[in-house]
Amino acid sequence: MSRDILPDTLDADVIVVGAGPVGLTTGCALRHHGVDCLVLEARTEGRAYSRANNLWARPQELLAGVGLRDALAERAYPIRLVNFFMNGTQTTPIPIDDVASPYPKVLYSGQDVIETTLAETYEGRGGRIERGCKVVAVAQDADGVTITTRRGEEGPDGRLRCRYLVAADGAKSTLRPQLDLDFEPERFEGRMNRQVDAKLSWRRSLEPDQLWFFYYERGFCGVMPVWGGYHRLFFLADDADVPDRDPTLDEVQAVARAVTGDETLTLTDPQWLTHSRFQYGVSPAYARGRVFLAGDAGHLSLPIGGQGMNAGLHDAVEIAWRLAMTLRGQATPVLLDSYDVERGGEHARLSEQQAKGFRRTVYRGPLTDAALGLATKVVPGLGALLQGTDDLQQLSVRYPTSPLSEDHLQGLSHLLQRGPKPGERAPEAEVTQDGRTTSLFPFFYNPDGRTTGWALLCFDGGASEAGASLRAAVEAVAPWNWVRPRLVLAGPLLNGADVPVLSDLDGKAHGAYGLEGQPAIVLIRPDGHIAFRATPDRTDHLAAYCGRIFGPRGVPAASSS
């Protein structure tokens, strides 16, 4: 909905509170979908230094889907390798880019750089930011949300009104307690993190294409690039005899030399010296009426692989397309309700996973270290095990219990041919179109220019007799013109269906979806997750699903772009 046709009582369709990476990504994604949006930020200036600073593969895919990834990549270092050392002995290095994604290399930048890039993009898309504006109260009714704002400590209160509100105002969120969504964090005792962003000189490589992690007695150290030729060094360790204050540069340098075994290591020109302790927790819900939590506003994340900001970027993209479809009248309440189920559940899972990995990393004793020292030569990916997950790239994020996930593929053949199920990320696969090599992703992110379009992949299973049922599936979704069918054909060409035809004669796409020899229809959501699977002869299941999620009939084509 454009700004000039908003009712006088509304200041925006959606207000986002917080102009950090998650809030700005939410704003950018909403503008990508054409939603009128206002971002409020209590700070008057952007952040002057880096905090969170990396982007994994799956968040990059989501950011690409809303047109943000490339601009961020221009100001980031692509990482190909992760090196791990256990008490001075190197474990098997992990090639971090060995994943099935168009964006396999993790990007390392800086939160200040990320915020600047996102703010420029958001304003370039016509988004509005008001800085120095703190939200002090929120009230909801059946039609919208009214917030009370304040400028400065004693500034006059103001009122703003919107249809929906996204709270992305960080771990110290002022909105979360007002929504009765606060939580008591669990603390890790006896451990402290000391950290510096500085210029680094040492005997190992300074090329910003790899990371270095060192497990040492009662501690864990990381060395990683930060945009602009800087490096970040952190030390998660026992706090015994460690002053409870920010460290000096000399103190950090001395520890770094001992931990890395490099007596020449030198740190200069520090941008940021800090110390912190550890606590974690998750809000009991990620939605309350017309208000939604995103990023740190809903969780306290542990510093394990930079997963916190990346999980928040999932939140930003996920809430934006749901709000856009809802505002366009293209969705039933089920769609917005699914955000809490999916993202709240995923944050709870991630928090538990991180806590286990954190305990393994910083509460190791002599016996554990001795066992791990023996294992360094025989356990591939030991570092990933210690970190709590073998999927730092977040490609395995899935929503099997979501109300948007529905599966009608049954029988022994589908059990034997294990393919991704509803709720899981739809895999990429090579196909051809008109003699050109291409892939599936361009056909279900923004399909046919529809930013909230859903892609219906119609697999023929190599069977010529599947044609009639695939045509019927195409017809079944016609009332919802944001559902865009694509024929994926391992068999003969199919005539009479005016939709894109993707040739899969070598069966790569069928194989990626576990559908060799099996005709099927697979519905893909705007975020690239599978929503629905069925055999193509059961178009009644497909029509019923669309009716449940989108409503009984579609809206005019003019309002679906």
Image (cartoon, rainbow, N blue to C red):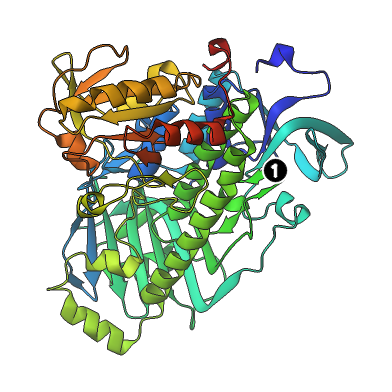
Residue 529 appears anywhere in the view: no
Q: Residue at x 69, y 16 (%)?
A: 3
Q: Farthest bottom residue?
A: 367
Residue of label 1: 291
Q: Residue at x 75, y 30 (%)?
A: 162
Residue 485 at x, y = what percent? 36, 23
Asked if residue 187 lies left or right of residue 514, the reply is right
State which quarter of the image contains the N terminus.
top right
Which residue is at 37% across, 73% downward?
Answer: 361
Estimate how packed mark 1 is, as few (under 14), some (14 to 19) or many (20 or more) residues with alpha carbons within 10 Å: many
Residue 231 pos. (x, y %): 35, 51
Q: Position of residue 176 (x, y in %)?
A: 70, 53
Q: Is residue 20 left or right of residue 268?
A: right
Q: How many numbered discs, if any? A: 1
Picture layout, residue 253 above or below residue 218: above
When the figure is inspected, residue 341 is found, relative to residue 14, above or below; the finding is below
Q: Position of residue 203 (x, y in %)?
A: 19, 58
Tell me the amino acid under the disc marked 1. Answer: Val
Residue 544 in sight in this render: yes
Q: Quadrant of residue 446?
A: top left
Which of the two residues, 444 or 64, is positioned nearer the viewer here?
A: 444
